[in-house]
Amino acid sequence: MPTPASTIRTAREKRGYSLRQLARRASCTHTAIHLWERGERTPRPRYAAAIERALGLPAGSVLESERPPARSAEGQELHDAPSKEQGENCYGQS
């Protein structure tokens, strides 16, 4: 299953964008994108949406790749699980 890091990097490279070009298009910093692509941080939902728009990805595709299926106490897979709480800044930190 793809991760947010691989989703962002693969799409960026496919379109031939540098980190700085994507950062300008998504109104974020190239440092944040670098951290996301390395898997060191996860983008907040609003930045994930900006990345998706800048790269022409389907809405929700960046963060959706991060979420493993939720499971009940009995171990059964649940559908439509809530997303993981995100950090307070564009780097995915609180």
Image (cartoon, grey):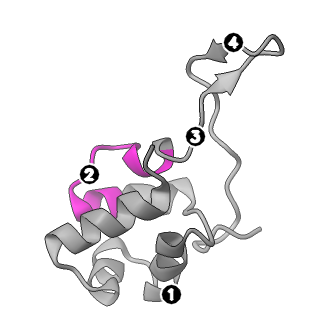
* Residue 63 appearing in the image: yes
Q: Nearer the viewer, mark 4 or mark 1?
A: 4
* Residue 50 appearing in the image: no
Q: Which of marks 4 and 3 is in front?
A: 4
* Amino acid under disc 4: Gln
Where does label 4 land, which residue? 76
- Of the image marks 1 and 2, the number of the one nearer the N terminus: 1
Quadrant housing residue 50: bottom left
Q: State the image coordinates of residue 15 (x, y, percent, origin top left).
A: 16, 70
* Amino acid under disc 2: Leu
Q: In this view, does 10 lie to the left or right of 75?
A: left
Secondary structure found at label 2: loop
Q: Nearer the viewer, residue 2 or 11?
A: 2
The N terminus: image quadrant = top left
The C terminus: image quadrant = bottom right
Local packing at callout 1 (Cα closer than 10 Å; few below 14, some 14-19, many 20+) is: some
The alpha-carbon separation of the residues under discs 2 and 4 comes to 30 Å
The alpha-carbon separation of the residues under discs 4 and 1 comes to 39 Å
Q: Is residue 61 magenta?
A: yes
Where does label 3 land, which residue? 67
Confirm or deny contact between disc 3 and disc 2 (CB under 8 A).
no
User: Which numbered circle lies on residue 57?
Assistant: 2
Confirm or deny contact between disc 3 and disc 1 (CB under 8 A).
no
Which residue lies at the image location 56% right of the left edge and 68% below the top edge? 39
- Of the image marks 3 and 1, the number of the one nearer the N terminus: 1
Q: State the image coordinates of residue 28 (x, y, percent, origin top left).
A: 44, 78
Q: In this view, does 78 lie to the left or right of 64?
A: right
Q: Which stretch appears magenta? A: 50-63
Q: Determine whether 39 is above or below 81 in the image.
A: below
- Of the image marks 4 and 3, the number of the one nearer the N terminus: 3
